[in-house]
Amino acid sequence: MSRSRLRRAITGFARYSALVLLATLLVLPIWWLLASSLRPAAEIFRHAGEIGLAGLWPETITVEHYTRAFAGELPRAVANSLFVALSTVLLGVLVCSLAGFAFAVFDFPFRRTLFAIVLLTFMMPFESIVIPLYVLIRTLGWSNTYWALILPEVASGLVVFLFRQFFAGIPKELYEAARVDGASWLAIWAKLTLPLSGPVVAAASLVLFIHQWDAFFWPLVAAPSAELVTVQVAVARNVTLEVANWGGLFASASTAILLAMIPFFLLQRWYVRTVALGSER
Amino acid sequence: MSRGFRVPLWVPAAFLASALLLLAVFRLAPIAIALGGSLTGTKLTGETVFLGLANFAALAEDPAFWRSLEVTLLFNLLVNPLQIACALALALLVLREGPLVPFFRAAFLLPMTVSIALASVLWAILLEPTSGPVNGVLRTLGLPPQPFFRSERQALPSLILLASWKGVGYWMLFLLAGLLQIPKEFHEAAALDGAGALQRFLRITLPLMRRPLAFVLVADTAANFLLFAPVYVITHGGPNGATSLLMFEAYQAAFAYLDHGRSLAISSVILLILAAIAALELRLFKERG
């Protein structure tokens, strides 16, 4: 009895040692960046090599880097990214839920084929078509516009799929009852189905928001002008342009990371459930 | 698919129009442009001319392209198994309930909230050879500082470290979902029969995890084939081509050398590789029923 208890204690200790070590490796870089962004310029790298509390917690806390970063192009970049991401969420939920509704509820010719094409588009990652898409946008004269940033991300195969799966689970009798009451299909979609689909709307919004907020390659080529610059492009350009201004770089990178974490941790539950289960279906 | 409501054709057409139009313009048309454009070139006068397979023939004779393809394949051969092994280890560690386990699950997910561009910025700073904190720690431990992204030998391993740091938590999610579906009784019965932990892992867990693992392998490979941001932000393909991944090579051709034919030819090669990966993915999807 005591021997098996000893063995369990040893495996428990090994498990938690591994957990602590791995969590440290994964979290420490972010922590170090956030802590360093609050250090006075002269102290940023003085503690870089220290193992211990001094390396992890700034002695003097200052927001000087943040004030300076926000006096530059950062506010414009944050506003651009938020505008682009939120517009994408709004249009994307609208467009993809309409399509998901049609695939789930109606019977029409080529339904399977069209749905297969939709699935296919989400197996081709967006990054793979960035350069031909750029050629297209340039020919249409849309480069350096908000439309170039927003429109390509609105229709997402994954989001159409998520909506279809959810709508297909709603009992048919509900639709029949509404039809008997004389409701149009558009009214059924707007007043019956969408209000029931809170969790999918949350997950879809998060998928669309994060994809757009994190986007780098496409904004870099499609809308590089200063008025349209997004957070990712602005921060990444700072690395090459302002190597001397580490403090400003840390502050702007920290701001961008923290802003992306807020929706993630607010909606994480729905995201994890929907995406992980979606892949299983 | 179950039978749906029979309605006049214009009803589903109206519901589908916006999404299908957007997908056609922004997803399907670019594929056609890549394949078509790779057969053309631009003359100095600016007019587009049909070249046939000349762009591909030029690629086949270009050592820079072969080097890039080789680096991309090597990178994928190393990074995908490594990431999946780490993701599986993480998933197994947080599978069973215990004190603080929800906290560790959240901690493992933290890097996936950092975009690839910002992760590149972060690791460019961490691995900075002169004043970066990783070399600072090495010095404190009495070890020699390393060049990381600045050396031909260490650049690709550094890139693998960066990609894995960002990716393992995300792939852990999918594997954890798979592990949670294995009935506990399987393990309990095997344990009663005297099977050790390692034996149970090899005989029960791994075979039952074949599908989630295959799914993650395919999806992870597709993602890593398209890696671009770290190369753009940190190494610019160097030193000496050691990190010239295909996506960056296509970008360079289009935006540094303004050679759209070559760039679209590289894009077509990438699309063909991804189509093969997607076909594999589709088969996995069908197997699932």
Image: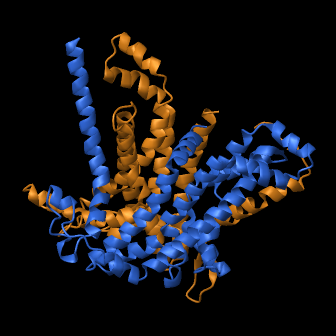
Q: Colour of chain B?
A: orange
Give the quarter of the figure containing the N terminus of chain A: top left
Residue nearest the viewer, comparing B275 with B162: B162
In the rendered structure, the answer to whether residue A232 lies left or right of residue B44 reads left
Please, which colouring scheme is shown?
by chain
Q: Left or right of A184: which side holds B249?
A: left
Q: In the rendered view, would you say A13 is above or below A227?
A: above
Viewer-nearest residue: B135 or B266: B135
| Quarter of the rendering containing residue A223 | bottom right
Estimate the x, y position of residue A45 in percent, counting from the top left: 18, 69
> Residue sitting at 87 percent across and 45 percent down?
A178
Residue A95 located left or right of residue A145: right
**Residue A280's quadrant in the figure?**
top right
Figure quadrant of the C terminus of chain A = top right
What residue sits 29% from the left and 78% below the top? A64
The one nearer the camera, B127 or A27, is: A27
Colour of chain A, in one word, is blue
Residue at 9%, 54% in the rendered image: B141
Whether residue B39 is visible: no
Above/below status of B220 relative to B254: above
Residue A267 at x, y = what percent? 52, 51
- Residue A229 coordinates in the image, percent (x, y): 49, 78
Q: Residue furthest bottom?
A: B45
Residue B121: image x %, image y %? 34, 67
